[in-house]
Image (cartoon, rainbow, N blue to C red):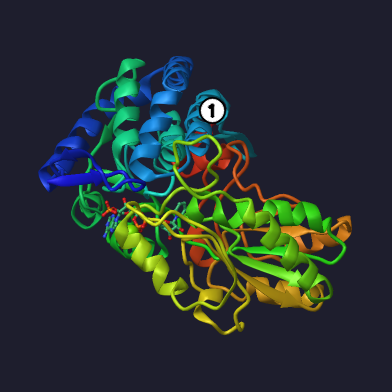
Amino acid sequence: MLTLRNPATEAVIHEMPHATVDDVDAAIAAAKAASPAWRALSPVDRTRLLRRFADTIGAHADELAELETRNMGMPLGSSTWCANAVADTIHYFAGAVEKHTGSSIPVAGGVDVTFHEPLGVVGLITPWNFPMLMASWKIGPALAAGNAAVLKPAEITPLTTMRLAELALEAGIPEGVLNVVVGPGSKVGWRMVEHPDVRKIGFTGSTEVGKRLMVGCADQVKRVTLELGGKSANIVFADADLEKAALAAPGAVFDNSGQDCCARSRVLVQRSVFDRFLDLFIESSRAWKVGDPMAADTAMGPLVTAGHLAAVRSYSDGLDTVFTGEAPTGPGYWHPVMIATPAYDAVVCHEEVFGPVAVVIPFDDEADAIRICNDSVYGLSGSVWTRDGARALRVARAMEAGTISVNSNSSVRYATPFGGFKQSGLGREHSMHALDHYSELKNVFISTD
Ligand code: NAP
Ligand code: MG
């Protein structure tokens, strides 16, 4: 039996059986059966159904937000933002259906046209940190491109994803087009990797599991896209608006209790303003209220599980911090925000903590900042703070990461591509690029002889 707990109280909120491999096979069969009619639907009808799905999600945003907060622990303000972003994401891809066009190419002896063909059945695997948001990033392009999907959410946070599947049916998405199975990744998720009827795996999660899936997909040359871990840099130059950068810095790393793949957990600060910026960063972190995620003024809730709390503590226990915030003692899986300035070779400067722990590292000049930023196996996101526009662009271009912001910490807009360099991933989500990863490009030559 799968037992789900509210991370803020440890109270049991739901119990349900684990899905089995047979359940996955049944879901894949249902998707396969639904696939021909879904792909054959006229684009305008597919758009209309997806828009109705998006509107239904929007109408249930408060309910979804509360469910997410109780299951996952993120503050209600964040989960409300997420629920609306889920609706917006589905709307974006609903609108994209008719705009994902092929091309005609001038060739000798005829005409040549390209088509984006649906893959068929796709397997989607999502993590626990932003459950419904990550689900929407995959459901949107997968369904818009004409595929049927089997989605496996992280077992510990399945409730909003299950609800999304119900809302899809309510909105008129045909049965079998979107299926959700809730079971352990190593069995239920892996079955989708092995199953010959699943043509693609769309995965968000850890780099470790992502690598395993890539190997598993190799056997059938199964398509795979990966959104993985990160250790992103927040680079603050001496000429930046330091007050503004420092006000934004806590959110960039402590948001969602640091359980964010885009967390700017390495704060790189130019040496000449290091002490001043650190003081400002500590000051703004003091105002970062940790507590009841249902309360309106809470900035940060608990960590997701006791197990994850222990994993974060393996980095933070004994860490020599320059600031440790306040947090409830329990019940609940609480961890305070922490800022530290460890020696550069410390493990915490290089590994993804996935908790509210920031390291602040000095640099000398632009070249030094870029060198430190790129000294990572990861490359998901990052920020540059400077008033020098040319430098902002130079540094952004030199950063080995997929999703950069200048004088901002924002990473995610559904209309712009999102994804990682190096071991942070493969492929892109959001934007029209996502549709390319949920379809095959077909080329047809027509002779005019
Ligand atoms: P995880 O342990 O890799 O799990 C992710 C998903 O994969 C879960 O649904 C999990 O199922 C499933 N899974 C685990 N082993 C599997 C296997 N052998 N075969 C198939 N599926 C398997 O990651 P997590 O702990 O949930 O999430 C944290 C990680 O996700 C962090 O590294 C974070 O950076 C990354 N992340 C990346 C992004 C991004 O967009 N780049 C976004 C969010 C999170 P069960 O857990 O149910 O067993
Ligand atoms: Mg995990």
The residue sitting at 48% across, 67% down in the picture is: 352
Q: Nearer the viewer, residue 16 or 107?
A: 16
Q: Is residue 326 left or right of residue 408?
A: left
Quadrant where ligand 2 appears: bottom left
Q: Determine if residue 6 is in view.
A: yes
Q: Is residue 247 above or below residue 232?
A: above
The residue sitting at 35% across, 61% down in the picture is: 308
Q: Is residue 296 above or below residue 272?
A: above
Q: Nearer the viewer, residue 347 or 398?
A: 347
Q: Is residue 34 above or below residue 330?
A: above
Q: Nearer the viewer, residue 199 or 339?
A: 339
The residue sitting at 58% across, 64% down in the picture is: 265
Quadrant where the C terminus sits is: top right
Q: Quadrant of residue 271?
A: bottom right
Q: Is residue 369 left or right of residue 423?
A: right
- Amino acid at the residue labelled 1: Asp
**Location of mark 1 (residue):** 88
SS of the residue under disc 1: helix
The residue sitting at 36% across, 16% down in the picture is: 171
Q: Position of residue 133 (x, y in %)?
A: 45, 39
Q: Position of residue 372 (x, y in %)?
A: 67, 76
Q: Position of residue 356 (x, y in %)?
A: 51, 60
Q: Position of residue 405 (x, y in %)?
A: 70, 52
